[in-house]
Image (cartoon, rainbow, N blue to C red):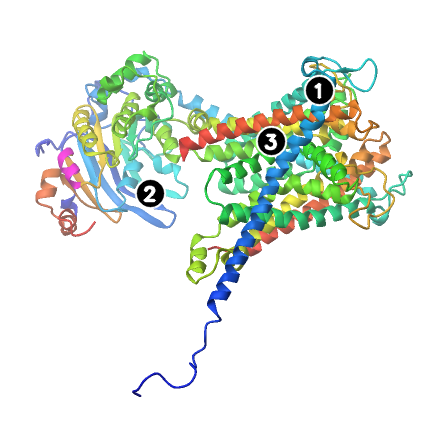
Amino acid sequence: MSDAIYVPAGPVELETRDLSVHYGEVPAVQGVSIKIPDRRVVAFIGPSGCGKSTLLRCFNRMNDLIPGARVLGEAIFQGSNLYGPGVDPVDVRRRIGMVFQKPNPFPKSIYDNVAFGPRINGYRGSMDELVERSLRRAALWDEVKDRMDASALALSGGQQQRLCIARALAVEPEVLLMDEPASALDPIATQKIEDLIYQLKQDYTVVIVTHNMQQAARVSDFTAFLYMGDLVEYGPTQGLFTNPKEDRTEAYITGRFG
Amino acid sequence: MTGGPPAGPDPRPRLVRPERNLRARHRRERTVGGILLGFSVVSIFTTLGIVAVLLWDSLAFFAEVSPLAFLTGTRWTPMFEPRSYGVLPLLTGSLLIAAGAALVALPLGLAAAIYMSEYAADRVRRTLKPILEILAGVPTVVYGYFALTFVTPILQKVWPGTSIFNGASAAIVMGIMIIPMVSSLSEDAMAAVPRALREGAYALGATKFEVATRTVVPAALSGIVASFILAISRALGETMIVTIAAGATPALTLNPFTSIQTMTAYMAQTAQGEAAQGSIEYKTIFAVGLTLFAITLLMNIVSGAVLRRFREVYE
Amino acid sequence: MSEVNPTDTTAAQAPPPAASGVAPAFHTPRPDGAPVPAAAADAAHPARQRAPGQFRPRLRYRARLGSVFAVICLLATLVGVVVLAVLLVDILRDGASRVNGRFLSGIPSRLTERAGVAPALAGSAWILALTALVGFPLGVGTALWLEEYAPDNRFRRFVETNISNLAGVPSIVYGILGLAVFVRALSLGRSVLSAALTLTLLVLPVIIIAAQEAIKAVPNSIRLGAYALGATRWEAIRHQVLPLALPGILTGTILAISRAVGEAAPVIMVGALGFIAFVPNSPGDAYTVIPFQIYSWVSRPQAEWKELAAAASLVLLALLLTMNAAAIYLRNRFSRRY
């Protein structure tokens, strides 16, 4: 099966080695070894319940928050095991940011939403500048620059999601994890998010979970197909969609299941 | 067998004359509905009764004593000369003790709520929460006993000069009594904050402390404030602890270590006294009662409005 | 999309240039001591150029702050538990010696050795019975009307708001109401009936709200099943909804009545007497109740009376404990999973 799993040639930012996740007795991710290349977009696809979100959440130790979740194996970030002894999840989460499926802005002002992360992490520079920079990077600045004190909840769904992206970028992460970031949005907002991802990959490594195969094809450089907790196939997106190596991959992308 | 319908009466069992049965059942239905509606109206009559009773004798009282003198007067001596009917001493007595109780209950209750909502393991919460609820179930007379016989002697050692009847002892014990009110409602408010909000904060590199204090508590603030208001209202309306432990001396003072009389204690103590029905001393009970009722009703309504606004955001 | 450069296989595994000077990824070094791969050490990487020094996460400080805070909150929670324990121990210490057969069967007396709580116990028993008798039908009836009959209009919301306001009215105000309506206007006098009716009004909102919850918990499918068989609304309630809601209703009622039994303020207002030398025989009799007896005794200066008050408190707590235990037992025994 290993020829269906691509090994990136360039620098590797994130990597897992035989990673498994169990919720109590139920295995969600089984023995996944994958290398995420630096400053590329990797998409995780697969049917519901295949473990793609769980795998994503391993990278910023969000599975720690679920009682009964056990992680075996290694997840390596820039050469160090994220689950090694003495690693502080708080530190991990600042450097590996996450955007969730349903936008979850805090019930605060737009400014305070973006400033929250930097404040907690002891940012010493100019907060105004950082907030503006983050909002620009998230392609939201022009729409909100005149109402920075307005409640974030007053924004539309697409704007809220871009705000969440700005918020994640404000703590200057090195990796951005996105869990179905556009699935709760309308097509126009989705397009904006996809354009944004294309911009972001110049500066960040992006891993995105999506159930929308067309989105994966549009947006990602590499795609990983997961099924029932296993990594079935992983490789350059073009290749995987036009010429899948595994039968299960072909069955999924041609819509025979999932 | 061919042919027409069988001769003779229809042997199949008949439905028991449906029209008559149905009418009787519907009649019964209407009667029951009427009875139940009648029961429900009792609650309306209760409120009307309370308002009517309080207003009736209070109006008679205010015919003799001007409301302004009542609300702004600083001496309360309805029983002996020179008579004075200023309710401020009673009002400050109630407020002082309620403030003291709040000082105990609000921080402790909120901290307990944060612990049980954000930190405690499920099993721990399931054990601690009912134990705290027991605090709310202890009869207030027993708390009064405890305040007078246990807390006051301790206070007298710590603060020499504390009199046997003092406001502080009552305030402390009352505060303990209303902790579950604050902690339960605050915890409900925090539990209603969606998980997604917490996850968003964790994902930015926040510690559990920061998530609890900078995300959850601010988001649950209206619910928490509603619990505070409700708890203070309860403290204002409480009778037995203050009657037993706080004293019978109306005093316009901020010193909790002396004997203070609250509105509720005044009403309870006077009702057992010798005031003749129809006398003005008797009517003071109703005037004070009206004041107390108005204040607590207002606070409860505000608390309900704050809680509703909180629920709107999250449901 | 990206290119795959087959000749560039060495970069991922090569040791970094020694002069990188960039700190390892986390606060712990790699266990095998190997140097950090190229990506992290590449100082020209945009991630590293994005002002890395401007964050001071102060992880250890924040973690320590969090632990201290957690301990403070735990202590705060335990304060209530500890005070409760202290209270119980204190009452036991003060009063346990006086709880004996004579105490439970005797009547109050000027002599502390002979004083007993029998009349107060009997009075409380009367209150319990009468409050249950009047409160249960009124409370359940109201709840049924609100949940099953009332259309969702302004009147119903008004009734519900009214009930929740009543729940917050101080108990002494109920005492004033009882004094004016039951004792005076209805001429029931200072009887145990007046007290029971007053206390019923006091706890009625509690019964109603508890019963409402229990009735709401019955799944609608059961009602619909009954209607589909041709039952009228009352028949569906009586035969299907009420039996299922009954455990919850009973639990709530018992808790409400236990609250009524523990109240003293309204009882003071409607005229309980501190010195009753007989057990009340009828609802019209003069009476006293345990909470009032406690109040009456604790108000006397001598230490012996205080001990009696403690003893009576123990009796009251035992009574309430029994009632609450019964309520919890009921709830656990009969609550079915739908």
Q: Please give the label number shown on residue C163.
A: none
The residue tagged 2 is A72
The magenta region covers A213-219
What kind of residue is marked 3?
Answer: Ile
* Residue C28 visible in the snapshot: no
Give me the chain letter of mark 3.
B
Do the residues marked 3 and 1 share a common chain? yes
The residue tagged 1 is B62
The residue tagged 3 is B179
Q: On screen, C48 above or below C148? A: above
> Dot 3, how many residues are within 10 Å of its Cα: few (below 14), some (14-19), or many (20+)?
many
What kind of residue is marked 2?
Answer: Leu
Spot occupied by residue B151 in the image (x, y as percentages of width and height)? 73, 27
Q: Residue at x 65, y 20 (%)?
A: B95
Q: In the structure shown, which secondary structural element does the residue marked by tag 2 occupy?
A: strand
Give me the chain letter of mark 2.
A
Spot occupied by residue C99 in the image (x, y as percentages of width and height)? 81, 45
Q: In the structure shown, which secondary structural element does the residue marked by tag 3 occupy?
A: helix
Quarter assignment of residue C267? top right
Residue closest to the eye, A61 or B158: B158
Which residue, as the protein is rendered here, is positioned at the far top? A126
What kind of residue is marked 1?
Answer: Phe
Quarter assignment of residue C194? top right
Q: CA distance from mark 3 to mark 1?
A: 38 Å
Is B145 one of the magenta-colored residues? no
Spot occupied by residue A235 in the image (x, y as percentages of width and height)? 14, 40
Residue closest to the eye, B290 or B21: B21
Q: Residue at x 48, y 37 (%)?
A: C154
